Image (cartoon, rainbow, N blue to C red):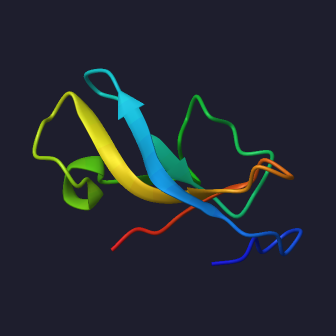
């Protein structure tokens, strides 16, 4: 798989989200007021994790060692 930013080869690996209540949020806006979370979509880490633990999520991901971009896919 190639990097969508610089087209270099991506390194396959895993993205770890640790901690009880650890969350990932998605928004199309770069200036959303994070305190209200009004315009944010919370991703269900338990549903997309490769592990069944509630304390962390392990997400299949790709990392570009040239430009630093991280790519992961949710289901």
Q: Measuring from the top left, give residue 54's x and y in whole percent.
A: 15, 34
Instruction: Inspect this view and state whether residue 1 appears.
Output: yes
> In this rendering, would 18 be left or right of 71?
left
Q: Residue at x 59, y 54 (%)?
A: 39
In the image, taking residue 26 as reference, residue 69 lies left or right, namely: right
Please state, as top left, top right, bottom left or bottom right, where the N terminus lies in the image: bottom right
Q: Residue furthest top?
A: 19
Judge whether 3 appears above or below 17 on screen: below
Q: Is residue 46 above or below residue 61?
A: above
Q: Residue at x 37, y 53 (%)?
A: 59
Q: Nearer the viewer, residue 14 or 44?
A: 14
> Could you say where residue 20 lies in the image, as x and y percent from the top left?
25, 22
Q: Residue at 73%, 56% (x, y): give it.
A: 64
Q: Which image quarter is the C terminus in? A: bottom left
Residue 6 at x, y percent in the picture: 89, 69
> Which of 6 and 26 lies nearest the eye of the viewer?
6
Q: Nearer the viewer, residue 65 or 56?
A: 65
Left or right relative to 24: residue 7:
right
From this viewpoint, which residue is outermost toward the left? 52
Please give the name of the residue rendered at 76% of the width and 49% of the height, measured from the top-left corner: 65
Q: Position of residue 19 (x, y in %)?
A: 31, 21
Residue 35: quadrant of the picture: top right
């Amino acid at each position: 798989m190639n990097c969508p930013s610089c087209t270099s080869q991506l390194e396959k690996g895993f993205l770890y989200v640790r901690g009880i209540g650890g969350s990932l949020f998605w928004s199309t806006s770069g200036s959303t007021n994070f305190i209200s979370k009004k315009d944010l979509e919370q991703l269900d880490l338990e549903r997309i994790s490769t592990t069944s633990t509630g304390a962390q999520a392990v997400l299949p991901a790709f990392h570009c060692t040239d430009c630093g971009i991280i790519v992961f896919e949710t289901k």
